[in-house]
Image (cartoon, rainbow, N blue to C red):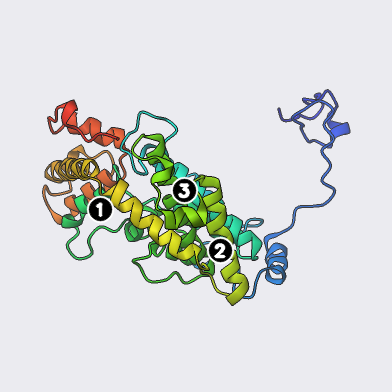
Amino acid sequence: MDTVPGILGADGRSDAETGGVGHAHPGARALVGRAPRLREDREAQLDAMLAPGATRPIGAGDRARPEAPDRYRLCFERDLDRVKHSRPWRRLAGKCQVFIAPEDDHLRTRLTHAVEVAQVATGIARAVDLCLPLTEAIALAHDCGHGPAGHASEEAFSPYLPDTGYDHAVYGAEVTLAPLNLCRETLDGVRNHSWRRPPPMTPEGEVVAWADRIAYVCHDFDDAVRAGILVPDELPAEVRSVVGTRPSHQVETFVLAVLDAIDRTGHVGMTEPAASALLAFRDFNFEQIYLRPAARRQAERVVRLLRGLVERFADAPRLLAEGGGPNVESSSPEATALAVRYVSGMTDRYALGLGVELLGWRPEDLPRGV
């Protein structure tokens, strides 16, 4: 409770005694002992502390729409705050990592995956004095462009974007996150975190690209074991001999190999034999998890469902909860773009529910999680 002049504060002391400041707990004496540091002072301190190749936060940052700098926060800290408070990031809690709308609450979602990527990436960045808020902002935002029901959404949406196709990394940076007006370095890290894209412009972005692969390879396997699809000993011997079968040991081994590469070369990479083990691990996951016959059958249902929703909303843009209306012509390129944007933002359960409500799907025909 805030204090009011002449009235006792929350801790029972008068306004004169507290200096007009309220306290959360009676008798609190949480000493700080120094004034808040202004952003300019923090930037100067970081400039001296960060590694030579680390990205320096400067002023308000390089943004598509210029802004005044914050008094206390670094430009990348503002990005991080905006990501955490955004709807696209919150909706990741309802988007699957591998298994569609799983009944098991312990299987990972896009949100928990993003948090794990951030943990891995900041662990690496902290050890080598890279810019932590930039690293974390890229990591938390990197999958905001993903549609519902996994990577099959990219196949579903691509025909409606004939010039570019639908790449979740590019779409996330250029469409989904555009309203947040994030810094150029943050958006570049999101756009280029995928290994099929050009390398990111910052070492922080490159660290996130490695952290993403480390996290999804190890944790997707862990989820497949929990779901009963695999057992730990099925992991190939060439992988087990290097990283073992425990997820925590696997992640640690890969992280240490990245730090070893930086120590040896000064550049972000991964030393052998871990780099080859990571590649073999990923290949195994594709064969045994992502592309197994049951997964492909579910992916085909996902594609049909999402395309059906896009076409339904493009034909009737007035149904769009965001951005539609009588001024958007039915089945026009604008209506189609709005439909893709709307459907791509849906959570798994919302998309599945609309499949029944709007498209007439039988519940038993919907894509299933495992």
Q: Residue at x 21, y 53 (%)?
A: 155
The image quadrant of residue 267 is bottom right
Q: Secondary structure at mark 3?
A: helix
The image quadrant of residue 166 is bottom left
* Sequence-first tag of 2 and 1: 1
Residue under label 1? 154
How dense is the environment of label 1, judged by Cα within 10 Å: few (below 14), some, or many (20 and up)? many
> Toward the viewer: 346 or 324?
346
* Sequence-first tag of 1 and 3: 3
| Mark 2 residue type | Ala
Q: Residue at x 34, y 32 (%)?
A: 102
* Sequence-first tag of 3 and 2: 3
Front disc: 3 or 2: 2
- Looking at the rendered image, the quarter that the C terminus falls into is top left
Residue under label 2? 257
| Mark 3 residue type | Ala
Horizontally, residue 307 falls left or right of residue 70, namely left
- Looking at the rendered image, the quarter that the N terminus falls into is top right
Residue under label 3? 114
Q: Is residue 280 above or below residue 147?
A: below
Q: CA distance from mark 2 to mark 1?
A: 32 Å
> Toward the viewer: 114 or 314?
114
Q: Secondary structure at mark 1?
A: helix
Front disc: 2 or 1: 2
Q: Residue at x 37, y 71 (%)?
A: 198
